[in-house]
Image: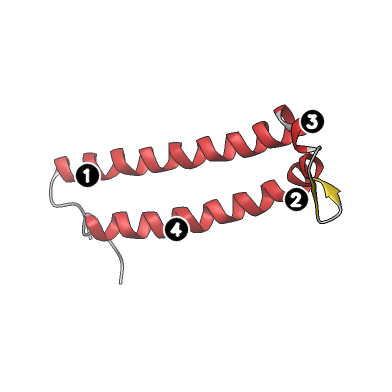
Amino acid sequence: MGFENNEKAAGYWRENLRLVLGLLAIWAAVSFGCGILLVDVLNQIHFMGFKLGFWFAQQGAMYVFVALIFVYVAKANALDKKYNVHED
């Protein structure tokens, strides 16, 4: 199913791009911020027997990335329904 008009298509892609950029900002903050910039501060906290900075760099960031995938799928499906371009 296609878009009803070009205005709706432009609105859809504008919202989709905003969603992707927001999720990429979270990805960058977690991977670069928690894994590199804040590692010394986070290492003061212990989590499951490991220093939190080390845990984020090795495992925690991956959990966040997988969660971002599920968030994107849910939000993209809602966006598809909003613009009536979903697949049943």
Mark 1 vs mark 2, foreground winner is: 2
Q: Where is residue 76 in the image (x, y as percent from the top left)?
A: 37, 54
Given residues 80 and 64, the one toward you in this image is: 64
Q: Residue 23: in sight, yes or no?
A: yes
Which residue is rendered at x = 51% and y = 59% of the image? Answer: 70
Given residues 35 and 43, the one toward you in this image is: 43
Question: Pointer 3: residues within 10 angstroms few (<14), some, or many (20+)?
Answer: some
User: Which residue carries the number 1 mark?
Assistant: 9
The quarter holding residue 45 reads top right
Q: Tell me the kind of residue under disc 3.
A: Asp
Q: Where is residue 58 in the image (x, y as percent from the top left)?
A: 78, 46
Instruction: In the rendered view, tell whether residue 32 sits above or below residue 51.
Output: above
Which residue is rendered at x = 29% and y = 63% of the image? Answer: 86
Q: How far apart are marks 3 and 2 (CA)?
A: 17 Å
User: Which residue carries the number 3 mark?
Assistant: 40
For residue 73, which numbered disc appears in the image?
4
Mark 2 vs mark 4, foreground winner is: 2
- Decide which of tag 1 and tag 3 comes sooner along the chain: 1
- Decide which of tag 1 and tag 4 comes sooner along the chain: 1
Q: Position of residue 1 (x, y in %)?
A: 23, 61
User: Which residue carries the number 2 mark?
Assistant: 59
Q: Tell me the kind of residue under disc 1.
A: Ala
The local secondary structure at tag 3 comes to: helix
Q: Distance between the residues labelled 1 and 4?
A: 19 Å
Q: Where is residue 53 in the image (x, y as percent from the top left)?
A: 77, 39
The local secondary structure at tag 1 comes to: helix
